[in-house]
Image (spheres, rainbow, N blue to C red):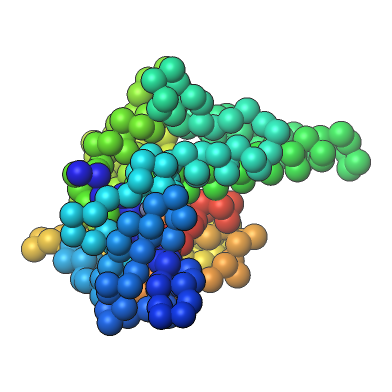
Amino acid sequence: MAKGIKMVCAYKRELETATVRNIQELSKADNGSLFCEDPRCRTRVEYNSGYTRLATNTTVSPYLKLAKDCCHAAECKNSISGAVKVFVGDSRDVENVPDIFEDTQDGSFTFRLNLLEQSRTQLNKLSDKMATEPEGSSLGKEYVETKKRLASYCKSAAGISRLRSLIQDRSDVEDFESLVKIQYKDRQVMWKDFFYDDERYHVLYNRLSRSRIEHPIAIRVTAKQVKSSKVEQYPVSIQCYAETEEQSSYIPWVNLHQDLKDLELSSGQSYIVLGHVSNSEKDRFKNLKFAINNRQQIVRER
Ligand SMILES: [Zn+2]
């Protein structure tokens, strides 16, 4: 039975009142009076105190999940299909540009990663051209529009990966993946090759050791500490919690472009990061390096 996604708000029924509350205002003692926040659903949900992710020894903060034997209404925004539809709908409202999500006949969506790459390439080209053009040329407007479009695509791509990250139960992963298919150039990219959680940093690293990955990928990281870097263009580097095995530690690094150097990631907070990744190695430390040029490439997991 489909379980849906981890939630942070619930509808709490009390003697006299009933309101939607954030998890910060709730506790285990509320179990029994908590219901799904979506008015079309209102199935029973429960407070969960969180747990430790063993792979990275990081803490998952409290969240709300379905109560035993309960399920969301099909159209509920916290069911897998409901969450995807709400997200795709919202991302469509943003701008009048080609949609990164394309409807398919069977009701699923094609997530067109190419569009993101095309915008990125175009932006780089414009940037090169502008460096040699006289000031005040028409390129400026095109540059701003392309940058905005790229930001919107990054937001959509990071956001859909965030939903993948919030799936409450592994048994739902298949449903999600058949609902959102990723297309890159003329081929399909499997979700397992696009999205990496804490337990799969080593998979990503090993894949990179074999060959470069052409398309952007998404990863769930938990920020650990901020370090400065000697690379002029990327002066701030955020070290994230590593997946540690006996022989090796796989460490994600989020390298912020100089324009984003003031962007703060909270230590202990989990984020979804979207971008191109490269690797390097020193002794037992195996680094996964992400270059962040656009702030929409990073989204809080919740
Ligand atoms: Zn629901």
Which quadrant is home to the C terminus? bottom left
State the residue in front, 21 or 105: 21
Name above or below for residue 82 compared with residue 56: above
**Residue furthest to the front:** 16
Give the image location of residue 8, x and y in percent.
40, 66
Give the image location of residue 190, x and y in percent.
30, 31
Tell me which residue sits at (89%, 42%) in the image. 135
Tell me which residue sits at (43%, 60%) in the image. 37
Question: Quarter of the image holding residue 10?
Answer: bottom left
Question: Quarter of the image holding residue 192?
Answer: top left
State the residue in front, 98 or 150: 98
Which quadrant is home to the N terminus? top left
Tell me which residue sits at (54%, 32%) in the image. 100
Count of numbered circles on the image: 0
In the picture, measured across the screen, residue 6 lies left or right of residue 200, that is right
In the picture, measured across the screen, residue 52 lies left or right of residue 63, that is left
Name above or below for residue 115 compared with residue 252: above
User: Is any part of residue 36 visible from this angle?
Assistant: yes
In the picture, measured across the screen, residue 298 lies left or right of residue 93, that is left
Name above or below for residue 153 compared with residue 3: above
User: Is any part of residue 57 visible from this angle?
Assistant: no
**Residue furthest to the left:** 246
Give the image location of residue 193, x and y in percent.
29, 37
In the picture, measured across the screen, residue 224 lies left or right of residue 148, that is left
Give the image location of residue 156, x and y in percent.
52, 43
Tell me which residue sits at (33%, 72%) in the image. 33
